[in-house]
Image (spheres, coloured by chain):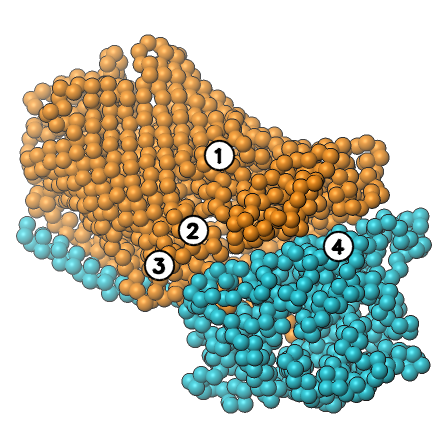
Chain colours: A orange, B cyan
C-alpha cells in the first residue's frame, strides 16, 4: 500500500518536473523586448481624498504596485496595455495606457453589489456577471463583528438554500449544514467544504479549524453546473472558503478582539420544593400506593425537615465568558505578498466544566519567482481544546430540590437522593480528569506557471495540500467521582491526508468571443489510524491517566483505514460579448469506497447557459434596469459519502472468557455489497439575477428540481438474514425548491441610511421510490411520496378523562392515559394500522431578514432568522418522571383526576407504545443585533491609528416558538440514550469588540 | 516553438501514463482492521468463529438495554409478578392486553436467535466446504457439531416461543426478503437432526479442549446436546426418546447432585444447595459436579471482555433493601437488588413443604434485619408494614446474589450463568416418564431430587406415583429451578401458561395479571420483520 502511495506521488512529481523543465525552455524562447513607459499617478476617492494601499496592476502581467500613504504610485507598462486599479470597497477602474505618464485616478465608492466582483468558483474564479450557475456569496458583514466560533454559525439563516442547524450548543461544537434539502437517506448529506482550493472535508478536520477572522469570503455552490466539477462530492453542494491574502502595498496591522458573557437562552425550570412534593404525592395516588413519607427517598428528609432546598440548575451553571483576539499583518511588495495572522479564542460555557479554546496561526504567501512562475502557500495551524470534566445538566434537572450537593466532608455527595442511585450528583464530572484536543496542521502550496507567446493564456497550476490532524483525548475517573477502582483511558488518532491537483487553464479572446478552458487531474488520499489504551484498578487517584501500567487490568485497541479518490475534470466557458454565456463541465471520479464489482469510476457532466439581458440593446431604454440575467443549468452530480469498507463482508474480533482467560472470537459484522456505486443527482436550475432602480433593489431568484437515484440506502433487512442492514443502491429522492434573496436600499441619502436584505427558501423533499416495487418501508419510516425525515407515529388527540369510555377505541386505556386516534376505526389502537405521518423533521421553509441602519458613524444591524414547518419528537415531554424517581420541569404538567389535563398524561402513565410526543419545532429567532461605531478619519489622525470600530453584539436574543423545552433547535437525549451526558442548552451571548488597524 | 510543444506534450503523456499505471491498485480496498471470511478458513479461524458463538449467546442473558429483560420470562406466569420498580419491557408480559407485534422483548429474542443461526450457518457452511482440507475429518465433525448445537439451541427457542418460523439452513451472502414460515415439524426435524449430529460428535465432558488454566468445561459437550435434545423430544411428543437422552446423561456417571458444603463460601452460613450458586462455585472446574453447561462470565475490570453487557438478574430478582433507612449494601445480603419482580404468593406461601432445603433462609431470603451499625434499630428485624414490603424487603431467591465491594451500585451482575444442571435432567426425565404413563418411574426420578432436598428423607419429602401429574412436575420444576429456568418457555412448551398463571397467580395486588389468553402461548412475530420481509408474507401468529 505504501508503495502505491509512493508511486502516485512519484507520478505527480514527474508531471510537475516535466512541466517546469518545459517552462525553462519556454522562457528562453519567448522572451520579448518592447518599450516600457514609466507611469506615475495618484489614486483618489470622489471627495478627492487620497486612497492609500490601492492596487495598481498591469492587466495580463504580474506587475503590481500599491499606492502609498498619499495615494501616489509608480509603475511601468507598455502602450496598449491596461492598468487595473482596485481597492476594497471601491469600483475597479481600468485605464488604457496611452502616451500619458501622469495619471489622476478617481475610484468611485462601490455602492451595491459590484457585478465585476470576482467570485470564487471551483478550481478558479469568475466575474459575478459571467456566472451561469447558482453560486451564493455569504454577505461580508456576516464574517465580522459576530461572536461565533465557527463560520457556519454566522451563515445560519443568511443565505438562501442553506439550512444550518445547531443540534448542540456545547462550546466548540459544529452545526450541521445541508444545501437544497436532503438528497440522500443513508449517505452523508453535509456539503463538501473546500478551503483555499483544497478539500477540508474528508481530512478529519472541520470548519472549527478555520478561524472566522481569517476568512475573506465564503461561496456556496448550489446547482449542478457549479458542483458537478466536484463529481462524487458534489451532490450535497459545496462550500468554498477563501482566506485572506496579502496585497501589494504598505503593511496593514489589524487587531480585532471581543469579550463578553454568555448565559442560557431559556431555562426549562425544574419543579420547586413544593411542586416536587405535590408531584410525588400525586404519583403515589395514581399508582394506588399509600404515602408513608413526604419525599421519595430518606436522603431528602434532612433538607425537607429543615426547609432547605437546592437550586440544581444554578449549581451546575455559571455566567459564561468568552473572548477572542486576533492579530494580523498583511502587505507585500510587487513580487511577494503576505498575510500572517494569529488568533486566540477562549470560551467558558454557562454549564460548568464546558469550555473551548482555540489557538490559530496562519501564513498565506504569494511569490512571483519570475514573470512566468508564481508560487505560494497557505499554511495554518489550529489547536482546538475541549478539555475539562463536565457537569451533567440532565442529572441536575432530575435532582430533588431536597437533595444536598455536598456530604459531611464537604465533597460532592455521590448519591444526593440517597438511596436513589439512578441519578448521581450532576457535579461529579467536575472531579474527573479529561482532556480532548485536536490539532490541524495544514500545508497547502501551489506553483503556477503562465505561458506566453503562442501559448499565451495557458496556465498550469500544481496544488498540493497536506493535512496532519492528530486528536488526543484522555480521561480518568476516580473515587471522588464514584469509581472505586479508578478508570483511565487515553485515545490518540491521526489523520494524514493529501490532495494533489494538476490544473491546466487556457483563456482566449477572439474578438467578442471569449473562451476559458480548465482541466484537472487529481488524486486524494486519507489515512486514519487510532490507538486506544486504558486501565482499571489503580491504588489511588494520584496518577490520573498518566501511567496506565499502574492499573491492574489493561485494555488496548487500534484501528486503521484508508480512503482514496482519483479524478479528472474538464470545464469550458464560452461567452459572446458578455451577453451570451455557456459553460460545460465533466468530471470523472474513481473512489475506493465503491464495490469491487464496479469500475469504481463515475462520470458527472453538466451544462449551463446565461443571458445578460440587461446588456442587450433593446434594454437600453429600460433605464430602471441596471442588470438582468437569466441563467439555466442542468447536470449530474454524485455522492459517495459512505464509510470505507462497506463493500466487503467483514468479521470483527471479540472475546469470551474460559477458565478466566480472555479468548478471542470472531463474528461477521457487516454484509458487504461489492456492487455498490455512487448516488447520482440530476438537477435543473433556472435563475434570475436582477438589479433595478440604480441598484436600489437587487436580488436573485432560483428555482430548482433535483432527482437523486441509486441512493446509497442503508436498508434494513429482516434479522432472519442474520444481518440488520446492508448498504445498497436503491431508491429515488426528489428535491424541488425556490430560493429568493433580495437586497434593498431603503434610504440612501443623508446621514441616515437603511438597507434591508432578506432571503427565503422553500424546499420540498420526497421519496420517489425505495426498492423499485413502489412499496413503502414502514420499518424504516420511509414512505413514498413523503419526505425522507418524517415523524411517523400515533396521532394523539388528548387524554382519556374520568368517565370516558375507552373500550371502543383503545381497550385497556385508563383515565390519564394518552388518547390516540383509532385511524382505521377497528376499535383498537394498533402499531401497524393507527400510525401515520405527523410531520416532517426538515423545515418546510426558512428565511432570514437583516436590517442595517446607519446614522453618521453609527451602524445598527438586526438579523432575524426563521425556520418553519418542523415537527420533532420532544424528549422533554416523553421523559416523564421515571416512575416517580426524578424531578421534572415545572412547565410540563401532568394529568390528575382533580385537575385533568388535556395534553399531558398521568404520572402513572406507562408509555408502552413508545409514543414520541411529536411537537411543532418551528421558530423565529432574533439571532443577532450589532451596534457599531466607526471613528472618523479625523479622530484617527489624532490617535495615529488607521481605523477603529467599536461594537457591541448580542446573539440568540429572543426566540418565538410554541415548543415546550429548552430550545426547538437543540437536540436533547433521554437518560442513557444518545449523547445524553452532553445535553446542553442554547446560549445567549453579549460581547463588546474592537477592530483596530494601525497606520 | 514546435519543439517546446513537443516536449511539453510528450512529458504530459508520460506523466499521464504513469498515472494510469498507478490507477487500478490505487483504488483497491483492503480492510486493515477487520477479518474477511476467507481469512478464517483454517482451524484457528474456525476456533475463533466458535468462540464468537459463546459471546453471542451471552448477549441473550446479559442484555441490559431494557433492564427489565429477565422479568419478561418470569412475571405474568405462575411464579412472579412485576413490582412498582418494574422497568417497562416486562409490562406486556403481565398486562397481556399490551402484548403487541411491536413488543420489544419479543423482537430482541427473535433478533438474538436469528443472528445466532447465521453465525452457526457461516461455520457449518465453511466446515462442510470440501475445499477446506487442512482439518481432519474428525476435527471437522467436532467443529460442525459445536456449531450445530448452537443452531439447534436457537431454533428450539424460536420454535418454542413463536411456533412455525422461517428455516434458514445456510448462511446468506446477499439480502433476502421473501421468507416464509416453515411447518413446525420441519423445524423440529431440523433441530433434532442437528442435535443428533451434535450428540454423536461433541466431546465427552472430560474430553473438552483445554487452555492453560485447564479443561474448558464451558465449551460444548455431548451432554449439553443430550439435555437439549431431551427437551426438544418432550416438546415434540417423542417422550420415549426424551427419556433415553435424560437417562443417558444420568447414567453417564459424569454428574452428581451436590449433597455437601463446598467451595468459596463453605465456611460461611449457608447450605449445600446454596453453595451451588455462589460465584466461584458455579463451574465444574470449581468442583461443581452438578452443572452440565455453565456460561462463564468474568469481571471486566480484571478480565478483558469478561462480560458482553451488564446482566440484570441480581437487580431484577434481588431485594431493594437498600431503599430502607438503616440498611447498607452488604455481601451477605447479595449486593444491590431492585426488586423489579416479586415472587408470587403461590410460590412463597404454598409451594414448599417444611424441611425443603431449597426453601431454606439461604435460598429464599424472607427476613431482613437492620444492618447499619449507625442506626438505632441495628440488629432488629425490619417489620413488614405497608407497600414497601412488596418491593423493598420482599422475600427473594439468592441464586443471583453477587456483590463487588469496588462497585456496590453494581449495574452489572458478574456471575456465571448455569444454563443446564443435572437437577433439571431428573425433571425432564420425570416428565418423559409421566407422559408415557410410567408414574412410579417418574416418582423415583423426582425422589432423586427429594433425597437431596430433604435432610430427613424419606420421613419428609418422598413422593408417590399417585402424586405425579404434569402440574406436580411443573411445581417441582419451580421448586428446583426457580430463577434458573426460563419459566415462560417451560409453560409455553408444555401449553400450561394460561391455566397455571390464572389459577395460581391472578390476583397480585400491585401488578395483576391481565388479558392472558390462549393466543399468548405463542409470542407475536415482530412487526418490523413482517414489514421488512416485503416479498413474501410472513404470517403473524393468530390473535396479534
Q: Chain of mark 3?
A: A
Q: Which residue is mark 1?
A: A922
Marks 3/2: CA distance? 13 Å
Q: Secondary structure at mark 1?
A: loop
Q: Chain of mark 1?
A: A
The relative height of residue A893 versus residue A669 in the rendered view (above or below) is: above
Q: Which residue is mark 4?
A: B511
Q: Residue furthest top?
A: A750
Q: Is residue B425 left or right of residue A862?
A: right
Q: Earlier in the sequence, mark 1 or mark 3?
A: 3
Q: Which residue is mark 3?
A: A772
The answer to which image quadrant residue A126 occupies is top left
Q: Residues at marks 1 and 3, common chain?
A: yes
Nearer-the-camera pick, A405 or A421: A421
Q: Are marks 3 and 4 in contact (CB under 8 Å)?
A: no
Nearer-the-camera pick, B284 or A407: B284
Q: Which residue is mark 2?
A: A783
Q: Is residue A922 left or right of residue B510?
A: left
Marks 4/1: CA distance? 41 Å
Residue at 91 percent of width and 83 percent of height: B458
Q: Position of residue A59 (x, y in %)?
A: 15, 32
Label 1: how many Cα within 10 Å (few below 14, some 14–19, many 20+): many
Q: Which quarter shows the C terminus of chain A?
A: top left
Q: Residues at marks 4 and 1, common chain?
A: no
Residue at 49 percent of width and 40 percent of height: A871
Q: Earlier in the sequence, mark 3 or mark 2?
A: 3
Label 3: how many Cα within 10 Å (few below 14, some 14–19, many 20+): few
Q: Chain of mark 4?
A: B
Question: In this rendering, which labeled residue sits more in front, label 1 or label 3?
Answer: 3
Q: Residues at marks 3 and 2, common chain?
A: yes
Amino acid at each position: 500500500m505504501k508503495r502505491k502511495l509512493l508511486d502516485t506521488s512519484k507520478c505527480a512529481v514527474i508531471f510537475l518536473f516535466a512541466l517546469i523543465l518545459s517552462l525553462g525552455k519556454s522562457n528562453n524562447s519567448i522572451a520579448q523586448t518592447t518599450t516600457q513607459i514609466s507611469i506615475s499617478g495618484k489614486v483618489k476617492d470622489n471627495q478627492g481624498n487620497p486612497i492609500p494601499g490601492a492596487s495598481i496592476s498591469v492587466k495580463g502581467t504580474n506587475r503590481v504596485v500599491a499606492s502609498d500613504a498619499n495615494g501616489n504610485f509608480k509603475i511601468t507598462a507598455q502602450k496598449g496595455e491596461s492598468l487595473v486599479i482596485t481597492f476594497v470597497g471601491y469600483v475597479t477602474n481600468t485605464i488604457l495606457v496611452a502616451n500619458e505618464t501622469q495619471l489622476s485616478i478617481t475610484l468611485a465608492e462601490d455602492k451595491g453589489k459590484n457585478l465585476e466582483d470576482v467570485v470564487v468558483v471551483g478550481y478558479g474564479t469568475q466575474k459575478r456577471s459571467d456566472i451561469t450557475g447558482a453560486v451564493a456569496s455569504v454577505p461580508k458583514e456576516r464574517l465580522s463583528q459576530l461572536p461565533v466560533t465557527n463560520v457556519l454559525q454566522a451563515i445560519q439563516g443568511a443565505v438562501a438554500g442553506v439550512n444550518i442547524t445547531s443540534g448542540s450548543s456545547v462550546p466548540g461544537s459544529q452545526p450541521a449544514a445541508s444545501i437544497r434539502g436532503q438528497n440522500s437517506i443513508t449517505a452523508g448529506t453535509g456539503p463538501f467544504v473546500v478551503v483555499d482550493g483544497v478539500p477540508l472535508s474528508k481530512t478529519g478536520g472541520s470548519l472549527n479549524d478555520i478561524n472566522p477572522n481569517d476568512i475573506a469570503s465564503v461561496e456556496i455552490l448550489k446547482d449542478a453546473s457549479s458542483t458537478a466539477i466536484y463529481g462524487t462530492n458534489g451532490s450535497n453542494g459545496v462550500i468554498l472558503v477563501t482566506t485572506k491574502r496579502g496585497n501589494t502595498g504598505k503593511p496593514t496591522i489589524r487587531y480585532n478582539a471581543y469579550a463578553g458573557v454568555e448565559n442560557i437562552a431559556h431555562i426549562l425550570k425544574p419543579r420547586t420544593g413544593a411542586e416536587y412534593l405535590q408531584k410525588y404525592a400525586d404519583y403515589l395516588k395514581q399508582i394506588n400506593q399509600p404515602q408513608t413519607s413526604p419525599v421519595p427517598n430518606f436522603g431528602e428528609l434532612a433538607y425537607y425537615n429543615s426547609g432547605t432546598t437546592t437550586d440544581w440548575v444554578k449549581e451546575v451553571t455559571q455566567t459564561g465568558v468568552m473572548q477572542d483576539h486576533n492579530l494580523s499583518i498583511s502587505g507585500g511588495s510587487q513580487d511577494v505578498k503576505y498575510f500572517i495572522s494569529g488568533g486566540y479564542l477562549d470560551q467558558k460555557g454557562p454549564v460548568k466544566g464546558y469550555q473551548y479554546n482555540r489557538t490559530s496561526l496562519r501564513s498565506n504567501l504569494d511569490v512571483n519567482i519570475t514573470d512566468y512562475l508564481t508560487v505560494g502557500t497557505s499554511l495554518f495551524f489550529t489547536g482546538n481544546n475541549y478539555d475539562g470534566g463536565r457537569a451533567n445538566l440532565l442529572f441536575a434537572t432530575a435532582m430533588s430540590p431536597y437533595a444536598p450537593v455536598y456530604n459531611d466532608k464537604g465533597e460532592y455527595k455521590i448519591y444526593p437522593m440517597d438511596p436513589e442511585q439512578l441519578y448521581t450528583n450532576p457535579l461529579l464530572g467536575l472531579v474527573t480528569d479529561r482532556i480532548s484536543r485536536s490539532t490541524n496542521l495544514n500545508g497547502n502550496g501551489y506553483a503556477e506557471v503562465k505561458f506566453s507567446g503562442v501559448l499565451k493564456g495557458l496556465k498550469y497550476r500544481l496544488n498540493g495540500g497536506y493535512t496532519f490532524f492528530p486528536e488526543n483525548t484522555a480521561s480518568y475517573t476516580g473515587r471522588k467521582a464514584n469509581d472505586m477502582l479508578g478508570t483511565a483511558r487515553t485515545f490518540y488518532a491521526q489523520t494524514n491526508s493529501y490532495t494533489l491537483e494538476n490544473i491546466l487553464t487556457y483563456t482566449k479572446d477572439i474578438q467578442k468571443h471569449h473562451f476559458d478552458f480548465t482541466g484537472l487531474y487529481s488524486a486524494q488520499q486519507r489515512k486514519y489510524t487510532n490507538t486506544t489504551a486504558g486501565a482499571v484498578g489503580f491504588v489511588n487517584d494520584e496518577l490520573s491517566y498518566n501511567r496506565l501500567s499502574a492499573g491492574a487490568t489493561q485494555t488496548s485497541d487500534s484501528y486503521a483505514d484508508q480512503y482514496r479518490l482519483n479524478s479528472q475534470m474538464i470545464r469550458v466557458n464560452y461567452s459572446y460579448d458578455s451577453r451570451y454565456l455557456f459553460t460545460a463541465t465533466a468530471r470523472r471520479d474513481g473512489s475506493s469506497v465503491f464495490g469491487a464489482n464496479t469500475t469504481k469510476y463515475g462520470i458527472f457532466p453538466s451544462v449551463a447557459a446565461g443571458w445578460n439581458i440587461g446588456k442587450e440593446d433593446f434594454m437600453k431604454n429600460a433605464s430602471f434596469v441596471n442588470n438582468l440575467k437569466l441563467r439555466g443549468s442542468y447536470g449530474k452530480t454524485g455522492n459517495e459519502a459512505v464509510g470505507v469498507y462497506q463493500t466487503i463482508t467483514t468479521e470483527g474480533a471479540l472475546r469470551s472468557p474460559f477458565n478466566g482467560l480472555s479468548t478471542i472470537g470472531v463474528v461477521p459484522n457487516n454484509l458487504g455489497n461489492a456492487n455498490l456505486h455512487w448516488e447520482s443527482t440530476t438537477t435543473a436550475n433556472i435563475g434570475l439575477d436582477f438589479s433595478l432602480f440604480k441598484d436600489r433593489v437587487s436580488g436573485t431568484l432560483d428555482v430548482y428540481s433535483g432527482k437523486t437515484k441509486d441512493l446509497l440506502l442503508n436498508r434494513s433487512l429482516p434479522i432472519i438474514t442474520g444481518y440488520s442492514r446492508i448498504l445498497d443502491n436503491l431508491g429515488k429522492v426528489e428535491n424541488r425548491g425556490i430560493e429568493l434573496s433580495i437586497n434593498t436600499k431603503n434610504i440612501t441619502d443623508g446621514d441616515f441610511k437603511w438597507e434591508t436584505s432578506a432571503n427565503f427558501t422553500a424546499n420540498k423533499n420526497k421519496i420517489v421510490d425505495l426498492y423499485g416495487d413502489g412499496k413503502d418501508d414502514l420499518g424504516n419510516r420511509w414512505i413514498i411520496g413523503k419526505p425522507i425525515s418524517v415523524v411517523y407515529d400515533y396521532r394523539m388527540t388528548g387524554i382519556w378523562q374520568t368517565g370516558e369510555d375507552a373500550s371502543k377505541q383503545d381497550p385497556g386505556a385508563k383515565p390519564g392515559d394518552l388518547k390516540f386516534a383509532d385511524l382505521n376505526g377497528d376499535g383498537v389502537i394498533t402499531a401497524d394500522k393507527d400510525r401515520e405521518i405527523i410531520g416532517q423533521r426538515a423545515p418546510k421553509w426558512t428565511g432570514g431578514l437583516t436590517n442595517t441602519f446607519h446614522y453618521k458613524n453609527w451602524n445598527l444591524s438586526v438579523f432575524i432568522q426563521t425556520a418553519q414547518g418542523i415537527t420533532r419528537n420532544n424528549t422533554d415531554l416523553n421523559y416523564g418522571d421515571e416512575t416517580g424517581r426524578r424531578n421534572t420541569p415545572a412547565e410540563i404538567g401532568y394529568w390528575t383526576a382533580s385537575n385533568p389535563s388535556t395534553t399531558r398524561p398521568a404520572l402513572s402513565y406507562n408509555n408502552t407504545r413508545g409514543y414520541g410526543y411529536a411537537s411543532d419545532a418551528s421558530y423565529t429567532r432574533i439571532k443577532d443585533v450589532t451596534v457599531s461605531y466607526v471613528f472618523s478619519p479625523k479622530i484617527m489622525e489624532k490617535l495615529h491609528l488607521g481605523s477603529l470600530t467599536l461594537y457591541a453584539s448580542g446573539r440568540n436574543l429572543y426566540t418565538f416558538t410554541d415548543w415546550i423545552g429548552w430550545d426547538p433547535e437543540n437536540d436533547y437525549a433521554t437518560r442513557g440514550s444518545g449523547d445524553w451526558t452532553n445535553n446542553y442548552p442554547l446560549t445567549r451571548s453579549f460581547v463588546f469588540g474592537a477592530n483596530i488597524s494601525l497606520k | 516553438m514546435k519543439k517546446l510543444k513537443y516536449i511539453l506534450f510528450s512529458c504530459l503523456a508520460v506523466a499521464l501514463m504513469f498515472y494510469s499505471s498507478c490507477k487500478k491498485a490505487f483504488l483497491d480496498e483492503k480492510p486493515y482492521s477487520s477479518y474477511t471470511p476467507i481469512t478464517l478458513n483454517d482451524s484457528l479461524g474456525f476456533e475463533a468463529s466458535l468462540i464468537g458463538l459463546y459471546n453471542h449467546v451471552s448477549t441473550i442473558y446479559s442484555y441490559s438495554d431494557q433492564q427489565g429483560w429477565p422479568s419478561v420470562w418470569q412475571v405474568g406466569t405462575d411464579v412472579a409478578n412485576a413490582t412498582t420498580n418494574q422497568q417497562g419491557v416486562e409490562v406486556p408480559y403481565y398486562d397481556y392486553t399490551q402484548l403487541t407485534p411491536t413488543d420489544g422483548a419479543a423482537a430482541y429474542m427473535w433478533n438474538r436467535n436469528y443472528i445466532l443461526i447465521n453465525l452457526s450457518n457461516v461455520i457449518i457452511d465453511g466446515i462442510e466446504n470440501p475445499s477446506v482440507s487442512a482439518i481432519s475429518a474428525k476435527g471437522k465433525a467436532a467443529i460442525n457439531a459445536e456449531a450445530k448445537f448452537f443452531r439447534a439451541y436457537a431454533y428450539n427457542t424460536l420454535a418454542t416461543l413463536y411456533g412455525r418460523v422461517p428455516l434458514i439452513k445456510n448462511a446468506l451472502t446477499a439480502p433476502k426478503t421473501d421468507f416464509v414460515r416453515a411447518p413446525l415439524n420441519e423445524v423440529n426435524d431440523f433441530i433434532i437432526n442437528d442435535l443428533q449430529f451434535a450428540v454423536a460428535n461433541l466431546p465427552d465432558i472430560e474430553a473438552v479442549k483445554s487452555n492453560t488454566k485447564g479443561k474448558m468445561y464451558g465449551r460444548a459437550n455431548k451432554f449439553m446436546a443430550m439435555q437439549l435434545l431431551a427437551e426438544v423430544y418432550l416438546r415434540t411428543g417423542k417422550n420415549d426418546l426424551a427419556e433415553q437422552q435424560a437417562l443417558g446423561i444420568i447414567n453417564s456417571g459424569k454428574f452428581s447432585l451436590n449433597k455437601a458444603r463446598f467451595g468459596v463460601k463453605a465456611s460461611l452460613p449457608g447450605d449445600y444447595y446454596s453453595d451451588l450458586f455462589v460465584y466461584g462455585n458455579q463451574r465444574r472446574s470449581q468442583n461443581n459436579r452438578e452443572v452440565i453447561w455453565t456460561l462463564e462470565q468474568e469481571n471486566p475490570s480484571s478480565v478483558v471482555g469478561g462480560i458482553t453487557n451488564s446482566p440484570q438478574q441480581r437487580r431484577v430478582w434481588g431485594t431493594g433493601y437498600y431503599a430502607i433507612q438503616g440498611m447498607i449494601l452488604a455481601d451477605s445480603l447479595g449486593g444491590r437488588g431492585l426488586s423489579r419482580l416479586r415472587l408470587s404468593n403461590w410460590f412463597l406461601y404454598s409451594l414448599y413443604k417444611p424441611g425443603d432445603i431449597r426453601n431454606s433462609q439461604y435460598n429464599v431470603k424472607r427476613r431482613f434485619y437492620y444492618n447499619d451499625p449507625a442506626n438505632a434499630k441495628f440488629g432488629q428485624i425490619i417489620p413488614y408494614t405497608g407497600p414497601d414490603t412488596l418491593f423493598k424487603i420482599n422475600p427473594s431467591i439468592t441464586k443471583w446474589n453477587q456483590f463487588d465491594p469496588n462497585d456496590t451500585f453494581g449495574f452489572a451482575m458478574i456471575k456465571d450463568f448455569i444454563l443446564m444442571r443435572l437437577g433439571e435432567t431428573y425433571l425432564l426425565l420425570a416428565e418423559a416418564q409421566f407422559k408415557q404413563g410410567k408414574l412410579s418411574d417418574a416418582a423415583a426420578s423426582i425422589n432423586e431430587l427429594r433425597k437431596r432436598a430433604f435432610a430427613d428423607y424419606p420421613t419428609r419429602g418422598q413422593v408417590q406415583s399417585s402424586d405425579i401429574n404434569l402440574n406436580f412436575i411443573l411445581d417441582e420444576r419451580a421448586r428446583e429451578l426457580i430463577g434458573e429456568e426460563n419459566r415462560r418457555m417451560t409453560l409455553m412448551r408444555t401449553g400450561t401458561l394460561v391455566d397455571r398463571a390464572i389459577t395460581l397467580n391472578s390476583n397480585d395486588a400491585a401488578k395483576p395479571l391481565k388479558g392472558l389468553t390462549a393466543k399468548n402461548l405463542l409470542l407475536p412475530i415482530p412487526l418490523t420483520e413482517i414489514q421488512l420481509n416485503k416479498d413474501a408474507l410472513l404470517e403473524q401468529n393468530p390473535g396479534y
